[in-house]
Amino acid sequence: MKYFPLIWAGLWRKRTRTILTFLSIIIAFLLFGLLQGVNAAFRSGVEGANVNRLYVQSKIHFTEPLPFAYLTQLEAVPGISKVAYATWFGPYYQDPHEFLPAFPVDAERYFAIYPELKLAPDQLATLVKTRAGMVVSQELAEKYHWKIGDHIPLKSAIWTKKADGNSDWAFDLVGIFDTSAMKGFAPAMLFNHDYFDEARGFSRGMVGWYIVQLADPNRAAAVIETIDKLFANSTYETKTQTEKENAQSFLKQQGDINLITNLIVGAVFFTLLFLTGNTMMQSVGERIPEFAVLKTLGYSGTVVTVLILSESLLLCLFAAVLGLAVAWALFPAMQGIIGVATMPPEVLGLGFAAAVLMALATGIPPAWRLQRLRLVDALAGR
């Protein structure tokens, strides 16, 4: 700690230059935290997929619906223990740019096949009995300050009502469920499919996809083959996948998220490396005679090197921590897009490691330059 005033004074020798570099590092790590947080959240959804569940969707595209009549046929397939279904509703509440993961479902079937979603039994019973009932995630209820008994108006970007042709829907909040045990993408709203099917203006008698639970996950390949053969050459052919394959397929529909984020972050850090490196080289270059004086006063080359590296670490780590903290605070705002409210902790560790590496990469070259300088030349400012 006795060297800290010296390090601090050197860091702020050129205040404007330091502030601009500091802000650049903050913005870079803010971008890093948000992008890598989204990337990690999507990966966790794939890696945390349940091996007991299969997804049955249209062979043409996952947006194409399937007949409700497939339900009984799927239940009769050997090796299947439970079947549920859902449809993408695509609503927003107040803000038309923030779509919510909402699905009309058979509540009893859906919660039975997703034990990760925790809903009180009395609230599930109320949902089943309430025609226009809805349950929402704890995170969504807290975000909008909803409580049980509230009347919630929504607007769907897809579904209109047959009664009046508009896309305005309203639901009664009868329960709040916990999604903390569910990795990756989680629903924000669930409501009764029967009410939705009766009220919608088109595609009645259809569902978006089926979710199948296996009695034995080791028989997944055989069950997948049986299902797709069952509906082969029909009007609505199917494509059945494991939950992991389905998650990966969905990500590919959105593009290679991992490649895109890594390219963006790589370009930002490549530029930042030169910016920070130039700052450190200028800062040290301006103080070569001062470092030479320190050596003549008895400070070893190792101490001088540590001073320079400490200055670089202080600059990079302090700015990186602030940038990652801002990203952590902003991350819940993206829950409607990625279904995760908290930045994965591994992103913080990765960001901290990147800051240390950047500090060493920008601090070592000027430190090495000082090590090779002759004291006579350094004192003369050569």
Image: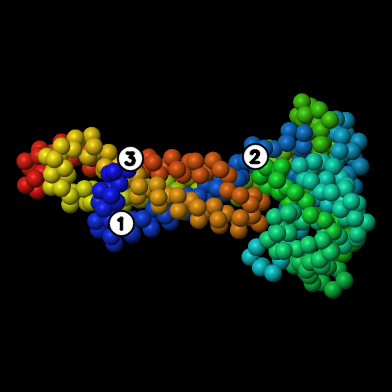
Q: Mark 1 = which residue?
A: 18
In whole angstroms, how far apart are the C-alphas of marks 3 and 1?
17 Å
Q: Are marks 3 and 2 in contact (CB under 8 Å)?
A: no
Mark closer to the observer (3, 2): 3
Q: Amino acid at mark 2?
A: Val
Single out the residue that lies furthest toward the right. Answer: 129
- Which of pointers 3 and 1 lies earlier in the amino acid sequence? 1
Viewer-closest of 67 and 300: 300
In whole angstroms, how far apart are the C-alphas of marks 3 and 2?
35 Å
In the visual, does 38 lie left or right of 294? Answer: right
Viewer-closest of 321 and 238: 321
Q: Mark 2 = which residue?
A: 46
Residue 60 in view (yes/no): no
In the visual, does 253 lie left or right of 4? Answer: right
In the visual, does 197 lie left or right of 56? Answer: right
- The correct choice, above or below, for 144 with respect to 26 in the image is below
Q: Amino acid at mark 3?
A: Leu
Label 3 residue SS = helix
The residue positioned 70% from the left and 45% from the top of the image is 180
Q: Mark 3 = which residue?
A: 360
Q: Amino acid at mark 1?
A: Thr
Label 2 residue SS = helix
Residue 245 x, y percent position in the rendering: 68, 38
Q: Which mark is residue 244?
A: none
- The correct choice, above or below, for 304 with respect to 187 in the image is above
Residue 49 x, y percent position in the rendering: 69, 38
Label 1 residue SS = helix
Figure quadrant of residue 364: top left
Residue 244 x, y percent position in the rendering: 68, 37
- The correct choice, above or below, for 368 with respect to 159 in the image is above
On-image quarter of the N terminus? top left
- Which of pointers 3 and 2 lies earlier in the amino acid sequence? 2
